[in-house]
Image (cartoon, rainbow, N blue to C red):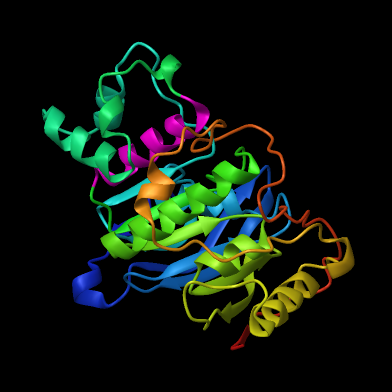
Amino acid sequence: MATDIHGAVSPADTGTAVEVDGLVRSFDGRAVIDGLHLTLRPGEFVALLGRSGCGKSTLLRVLAGLDREIEGEVLVPRRKAVAFQAPRLMPWKRVWRNVLLGLPGRPERDAAVRALAEVGLGHRADAWPKTLSGGEAQRASLARALVREPDLLLLDEPFGALDALTRIKAQRLVAELWQERGCAVLLVTHDVEEALLLADRALVMEGGRIAYETEVDLPRPREVSDPRFAALRARLLDRLGVDETEAGPRNGGAAPRSGAAASRTADEQASGAGTSSASPAGPTAATDLTARPDHSQHRTENP
């Protein structure tokens, strides 16, 4: 199997933030990703949906440069960062030192404090990780990604372990930071409503490929009561093989909107930005994407 096919792409020069062509990743002879093609534009927010085990997280790890046992071509910006479901903070390092963990050279404390302030955690720079609430730990993990000034931010179900209230606030925070930073974002999620509230484009992964995509051409902030939102939701649920009547309760309010003070000062209580852990349902109960693998051809639709 070919290895280390990654290369760098300059968003300013190429007009793309991510280019993937013919990507294959196999485990024990089984192709989890099979001839996948993907392009992300600079500053675009893309949500990736799919049933458990379809290869979403594997794709994200490949884009992050954490998995190089691949075939095909993967071009990503040199400046990229990833946040997973669990914070993975080092308990023997103060919060600000955790934020700088892994940065080359000798980065200064001020860089960490600025990133922490962006997520409403500047006052906790000298705290020990064990004193943070779960939501604060998640924000510290997000600050660790932001301090790298990424052109591409990869989020692997970062809200999955959060309680409903904390999850709404975390969604708002990510939406604000994306609008302020202007980087491309790829969000892996099981939650159809979350995808539609946050993303410019929603993709469905099936059979190791991007089998379906749709633009989310709705004004921000988005309302789940908007008939156009409901139509997109129904279309994605159908594509995922989920009966809408069985998809769980909906978020009756609005999409994440501006209001940094509201989203960055709450003492949140559950964790979220690293690789593991099962999660309760979020504010828009995460739909269990487990049924009906009956579509195989890639389709693109506009709402």
- Left or right? Give the position of 186 relative to 212: left
In this orientation, does residue 65 appear?
A: no
Numbered disc total: 0
- Left or right? Give the position of 274 relative to 76: right
Q: Is 287 contained in the magenta span?
A: no
- In percent of width and height, residue 274 lies at 50, 35
Q: Residue at x 50, y 48 (%)?
A: 169
- In percent of width and height, residue 231 lies at 71, 82
Residue 283 against residue 140 in the figure, above or below: below
Q: Residue at x 32, y 34 (%)?
A: 121
Return the residue nearer the eye: 24 or 116: 116
- Left or right? Give the position of 224 relative to 91: right
Residue positioned most to the bottom: 302
The magenta span reads 133-148
Return the residue nearer the eye: 124 or 101: 124
Return the residue nearer the eye: 209 or 109: 109
In this orientation, does residue 114 appear?
A: yes
Residue 72 against residue 229 in the figure, above or below: above
- Left or right? Give the position of 51 relative to 102: right
Residue 101 against residue 94 in the figure, above or below: below
Q: What is the quadrant of residue 51 in the picture?
A: bottom right
Return the residue nearer the eye: 131 or 267: 267
Q: Residue at x 44, y 30 (%)?
A: 137
Residue positioned most to the top: 92
- In percent of width and height, residue 203 lies at 59, 70
Predominant secondary structure in magenta?
helix
